Image (cartoon, rainbow, N blue to C red):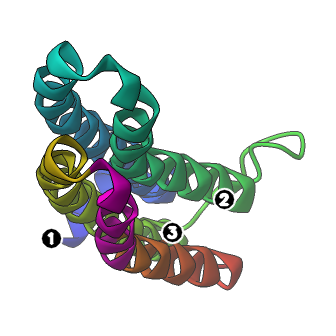
Amino acid sequence: MVEFFEMFGGIGLAFLGAALSVALCCIASAKGTGMVGEAATGVLTEAPEHFSKCLILQVLPGTQGLYGLVVWFFALFTMGAFSGGIVDLSVTQGLTIFVSCLPMAFGGWLSAIYQGRVAAASINVVAKRPDDWAKGIILCGVVEFYAILSLLASVLLLMNAL
């Protein structure tokens, strides 16, 4: 097992963690926003005046992609990418950065999909009771809370990684 880690080195492990954070979050955000967009098109064919409400619900699952990008940025910053050159990381340091990115990678991945499902279901509120559409936003906010916790965990871990 040690040979496996030494083959990639600390830099490879750190880049892998950063890449997983942004990739998983963005893939899931695309899936979540896509689900909401599909649900919204049915409503918009009958009631185009509800476009802004549907758009707000669609944007919500996309925030995890931004959070993943923030963690990616923090990971690269920790590696020294924005200060003149990437630091030669030991396997332990690289693994520390990799593991620090995991809360956002997995938390953002799952919360974007589940938030997309909640937002897609909330499109039904827009269709049947347009004045109550903010309740759907509140329901989406509950899922968003866990994405924010994942972001916080990864950022705090990365701030203390090296």
- State which quadrant residue 38 falls in: top left
Labels 1, 2: front one:
2
Choose between 59 and 85: the one closer to the eye. 59
Residue 7 drawn at (x, y percent): 31, 50
Residue annotated with mark 1: 1
Instruction: Tell me where the magenta segment starts and ends, as one range.
Output: 130-143
Mark earlier in primary sequence (1, 2):
1
Q: Is residue 142 magenta?
A: yes
Q: Secondary structure at mark 3?
A: helix
Q: Residue at x 34, y 36 (%)?
A: 54
Vertically, is 46 above or below 52? above
**Residue at 28% in and 47% down:** 24
Q: Nearer the viewer, residue 81 or 67?
A: 67
Frontmost residue, 9 versus 56? 56
Q: How many neighbours does mark 3 have within 10 angstroms: few (below 14), some (14-19), or many (20 or more)? A: many
Principal secondary structure, stretch drawn in magenta: helix
Examine the image and state in which quarter residue 64 appears: bottom left
Residue 6 lies in quadrant = bottom left
Inspect this view and state whether residue 12 appears: no
The residue that label 2 is drawn on is 74
In this image, 132 relative to 86: left or right?
left
The residue beneath circle 3 is 97
Of pointers 3 and 1, the one earlier in the residue sequence: 1
Q: Amino acid at mark 1?
A: Met
Which mark, by number, is residue 145? Answer: none
